[in-house]
Image: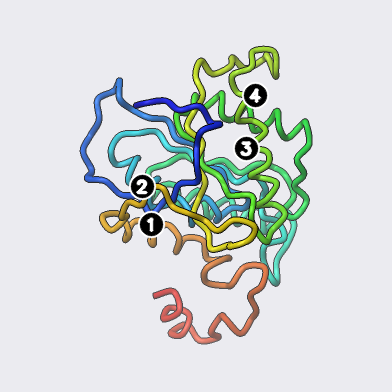
Amino acid sequence: MKRFSFSYLLPLVFFISIAVIPVAAQDKLRIICFGAHPDDAELKAGGVAAMWAAKGHEVKLVSVTNGDIGHWNEAGGPLARRRKAEVEKAAKIFGSTVEVLDIHDGELLPTLENRRLITRLIREWKADIVMSHRPNDYHPDHRYTWMLIQDAAFMVAVPNFSPDIPPLKSYPVFLFYSDRFTKPIPFQADIVVSIDSVMDKKLAGLMELESQFYEGGALGSADLVPKESAGQQARRD
């Protein structure tokens, strides 16, 4: 795989799918996908995660916060544990691994401590490709996730920054997820690839995230959840 310096990369889109052909061991890629909450990487990169995993590549999804306020009726430790269990189920469907960091939802900041944390995660995974949000976003956790990735992008190869983890010998490719924000700069895709071949698998993974896509997440309400069992099943379907 051709390597590019992160400073020359432009935002890329992730509607990605390629024919599922096993790859030789020496050609395997290691991909790490960051999202601010336990649903973001799954929603933005679940299809490409499933596709790459099926091809034999190693894929990891990371939630930078624990999602503990991302529900209209639940919060705190119980919600964080529930959402962690949800993304673990989704990861099994995608064929990826998953990690949820213990940072409170809504409280992420681009601190030096968090920069070191993100740098270590990228190094430990020995990433060839790193994915994240763009800076243009309504949610501060999304914006600060981008900032932490941006700040780590150079530091992953600097030996004396967090020297307890060996630096990468070459820079990964850093990529942005697609979005619909238009200011200050609209998203412009440089690469678009269909995920038709893995769409069913992506949707199956997302359906495991019931707190978000069935119950509506932070902006949901009891009105979204039918009271009778038949209606509940129909909403899931």
Provide the residue designation for mark 4: 155
Q: CA distance from mark 4 to mark 3?
A: 10 Å
* The C terminus: image quadrant: bottom left
At label 4, counting other C-alpha atoms closer than 10 Å, the crowd grade (few under 14, some 14-19, many 20 or more) is: many
Q: Earlier in the sequence, mark 4 or mark 1?
A: 4
Q: Amino acid at mark 3?
A: Ile
For marks 3 and 1, the one nearer the N-term is: 3
Which label sits in the foreground, 4 or 2? Answer: 4
Residue at label 1? 202
Q: CA distance from mark 3 to mark 2?
A: 23 Å
- Badges 4 and 1: C-beta atoms under 8 Å apart? no
The circle drawn on residue 149 is 3
The answer to whether mark 2 and mark 1 are in CB contact below 8 A is yes
Distance of label 4 from label 1 (alpha carbons)? 32 Å
How far across and down, in percent of the image, does residue 16 sit? 35, 50
Disc 1 residue crowd, few under 14, some 14–19, many 20+, Cα 10 Å: many
Q: Is residue 111 above or below residue 71?
A: above
* Sooner in the amino-acid sequence: mark 2 or mark 1: 2
> What type is the residue that disc 1 sits on?
Lys
Measured Cα–Cα span from mark 4 to mark 2: 29 Å
Q: Is residue 193 above or below residue 28?
A: below
In the rendered structure, find residue 50 and report the number of the disc placed on it. 2
For badge 2, the amino acid type reads Ala
Sequence order check, earlier mark of 4 and 3: 3
Q: Mark 3, residues whose alpha carbon is within 10 Å: few (<14), some, or many (≥20)?
A: many
SS at badge 4: helix
